[in-house]
Image (spheres, rainbow, N blue to C red):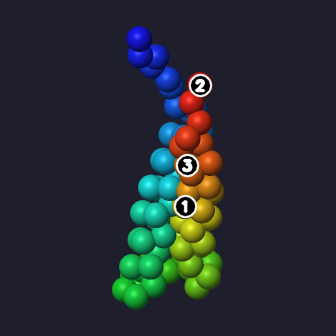
Amino acid sequence: MLEHKMKPIWFFVGLILLVMGGLIMLNGIYLLFNPSQRVTVLSEIHPDIWWGAIMAAFGGFMYFKTRKETV
């Protein structure tokens, strides 16, 4: 008889953070090479690249840490 095992919630949270962080970082890289006309207060430090990288790193960590776990 087959037992259906569930993934933990952190697997899906990590997957969502990995995808969203990657998209935000790619958008920041695009804006780095094609700057827009609108300038914000701290746009010269490129926070979208930093936050995208942080989100993708944390999401990747959570995804790969919990991908083998089952409840």
Label 1: which secondary element: helix
Circle number at residue 56: 1
Badge 3: residue crowd in 10 Å (few <14, some 14–19, many ≥20): many
User: In what element is the residue under mark 2?
Assistant: loop
Q: Helix, strand, or loop for circle 3? A: helix
Visible residue check, residue 13: no
Amino acid of disc 2: Val
Which quadrant of the view contains residue 40? bottom right
Which of pointers 2 and 1 lies earlier in the amino acid sequence? 1
Q: Earlier in the sequence, mark 2 or mark 3?
A: 3
Question: Where is residue 23 drawn, in percent x and y?
Answer: 42, 63
Q: What number of labels is visible?
A: 3
Examine the rendered structure and indicate whether residue 65 appears above or below residue 4.
below
Evaluate if marks 2 and 1 touch, with contact meaning CB atoms under 8 Å apart: no
Quadrant in the picture for the N terminus: top left
How far apart marks 2 and 1 lie (CA) works out to 25 Å
Quadrant assignment, res 37: bottom left
User: Circle 3 sits on which residue?
Assistant: 63
